[in-house]
């Protein structure tokens, strides 16, 4: 009996080890090809570039949704400078741009769109990444605990970057951390650490103690693989683009059209048709 029990234990242990190894080998790693942009492209923490994490996050996804594999420092700076100028006109400041203001810049001044989501779960974020849609997150940098980011001890610690993937085997999100000048591209944070750090900026007390909100992003122009119908997406509405001349009139590029699952697209309500 002891011999049989010992053999059974050995076999079970071998099976468990094999199953564990197989799970480790097949645990998914998702990493979207989002070009990296630092909030200090020149490496100098001066002027507007001291608080440019929001603009850098938008710039990365502007490139990603426009089909760019890389973005030059010069082009990144030019796009970010335009956002600084817009923010000064709208709010007299380009510092501490919360999710609402960031979304307005995305909607009005970029080639992609987004929506604010309150209290997302790890699985919610992973589902977006699985679908090829990066997530913009506002964070309390002190809680984030990245020593490579030079937050002022007397400041709010407000930070923002883009989640570009995850590693299921290690339980880590993969990010393009705009403020990490040493290890920003592909920087990894454990799920719990990042989720605990998610907080929006609070203009009332000038602290990063707002609700846990993020921005789920998506293309402005989309179609399914089985249809020629192209839609303009904004908020929770999809608008059919009725004629190719609309692209000319609005200065859109055909490369901006993303192929999306029909199961996702049907979640948008039908809006007014866009005619030329």
Image: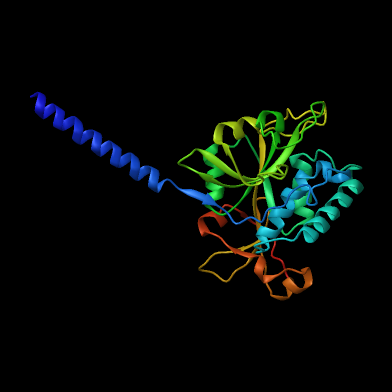
Q: Quadrant of the N terminus?
A: top left
Which residue is nearer to you in this view: 252 or 30?
30
State the residue at coordinates (81%, 53%).
Answer: 80
State the residue at coordinates (73%, 27%).
Answer: 209
Can see residue 220?
A: no
Can see residue 87?
A: yes
Residue 2's spot in the image, x, y percent?
10, 24
Eyeballing the image, is 43 above or below 78? above
Eyeballing the image, is 70 above or below 52? below
Which residue is nearer to you in this view: 103 or 62?
62
Q: How many marks?
A: 0
Residue 251's spot in the image, x, y percent?
77, 69
Q: How is the image coloured?
A: rainbow
Q: Quadrant of the C terminus?
A: bottom right
Residue 100's spot in the image, x, y percent?
76, 41
Res 188 quadrant in image: top right
Which residue appears farthest toward the left when viewing the image?
Answer: 1
State the residue at coordinates (39%, 48%).
Answer: 26
Which residue appears farthest toward the top when viewing the image?
Answer: 2
Left or right: residue 217 versus residue 123 is right
Residue 232's spot in the image, x, y percent?
67, 61
State the residue at coordinates (52%, 40%).
Answer: 123
Which residue is nearer to you in this view: 184 or 53?
184
């Amino acid at each position: 009996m002891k011999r049989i029990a010992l053999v059974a234990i050995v076999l079970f242990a071998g099976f468990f080890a094999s199953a564990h190894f197989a799970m480790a080998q097949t645990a998914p790693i998702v990493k979207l090809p989002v070009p990296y942009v630092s909030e200090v492209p020149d490496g100098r923490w001066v002027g507007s570039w001291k608080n440019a994490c929001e603009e850098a996050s938008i710039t990365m996804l502007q490139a990603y949704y426009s089909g760019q594999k890389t973005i030059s420092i010069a082009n990144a700076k030019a796009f970010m400078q335009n956002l600084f100028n817009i923010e000064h006109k709208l709010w007299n400041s380009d510092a501490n741009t919360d999710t609402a203001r960031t979304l307005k810049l995305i909607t009005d001044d970029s080639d992609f769109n987004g929506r604010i989501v309150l209290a997302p779960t790890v699985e919610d974020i992973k589902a977006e990444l699985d679908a090829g849609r990066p997530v913009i997150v506002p964070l309390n940098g002190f809680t984030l605990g990245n020593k490579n980011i030079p937050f002022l001890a007397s400041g709010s610690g407000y930070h923002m970057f883009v989640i570009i993937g995850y590693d299921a085997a290690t339980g880590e999100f993969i990010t393009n951390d705009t403020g990490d000048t040493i290890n920003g591209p592909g920087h990894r944070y454990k799920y719990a650490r990042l989720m605990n750090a998610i907080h929006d900026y609070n203009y009332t007390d000038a602290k990063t103690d707002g609700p846990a909100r993020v921005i789920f992003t998506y293309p402005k122009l989309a179609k399914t693989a089985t249809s020629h119908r192209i839609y303009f997406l904004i908020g929770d509405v999809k608008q059919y683009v009725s004629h190719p001349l609309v692209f000319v009139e609005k200065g859109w590029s055909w490369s901006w059209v993303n192929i999306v699952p029909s199961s996702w697209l049907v979640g948008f309500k039908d809006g007014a048709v866009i005619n030329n």
